[in-house]
Image (cartoon, rainbow, N blue to C red):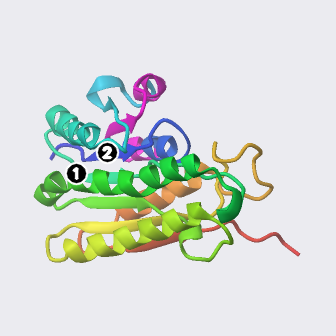
Amino acid sequence: MADPVLLITGASSGIGAATAREASRAGYRLVLAARSREKLRDLQQELGGDDRAIVVACDVQDHDDQLNLAHEAENAFGQIDAVFANAGRGGEPGGFSEADPDVWRDMILTNILGVGLTVQACLPALRRSRGHLLLTGSAAGRVTIPGSMYSATKWAVSAIGYGLREEVRGSGMRVTLIEPGMVDTAFFDQPPERALQPEDIARAVLYALSQPSHVDVNEILVRPTPAVE
């Protein structure tokens, strides 16, 4: 059988790029999506060039871009076996009383609408392959964080994961929520004192993907180990 195909949104850096590298080592062919193709070219070459990875420009807020992403994936590789809906953005300080509403708008459209559009565009191919859909949620989508619209968007991603799992029940598809705690990525101007690395989350994604078809890993919550007292 041909090597399986994994599509990743938000693949140009951080968790997305780390997952692409981990999946490549595991034998996956990759569909790498981000707003700019140029940000993906070096990663594509690192992962084996056109035969092993394609790059697609995709603004996850744009329905036509998302449909084109799924089309380009199937056109290049003939199938989509797994999708990691990973594109997202963080917020800004200020809470509900002072945050910039334009930042909210972009964050909500990316973190919620963008995930929904990725799911919708890729579902037909995943139903055919009885594939696996993974969503980047967050530990922030499990707790109440004062004044955090970002946390609210990740609660919504959790709800998308739960709702999707029920929608595809009995189809052979699997749905996994990947829920990182604080990760040292471009979300932060200064690396947090104690934080996970993108590679830590990539290994969690590959753990879920590597399970046999009768095992559905619903959620993986990954947090940094607390400091030793």
Q: Position of residue 128 (x, y in %)?
A: 11, 56
Which residue carries the number 2 mark? Answer: 7
Q: Nearer the viewer, residue 132 or 90?
A: 90
The disc at residue 122 is 1
Q: Which residues are magenta?
A: 22-44
Q: Residues within 10 Å of mark 2 (few under 14, many from 20)?
A: many
Residue 217 visible in rendering: no
Q: Residue at coordinates 55% horizontally, 46% vertically from top-left?
A: 102
- Give, as a three-letter code, the residue at label 2: Leu
Question: Which residue is pictured at 38% across the width and 74% down the height?
Answer: 218
Q: Is residue 81 magenta?
A: no
Q: Is residue 1 left or right of residue 178?
A: left
The CA span between labels 2 and 1 is 9 Å
Magenta span has 28? yes
Q: Image quadrant of residue 30?
A: top left
Marks 2 and 1 in Cβ contact (< 8 Å)? yes
Q: Nearer the viewer, mark 2 or mark 1?
A: 1
- Residue placed farthest to the right in the image? 229
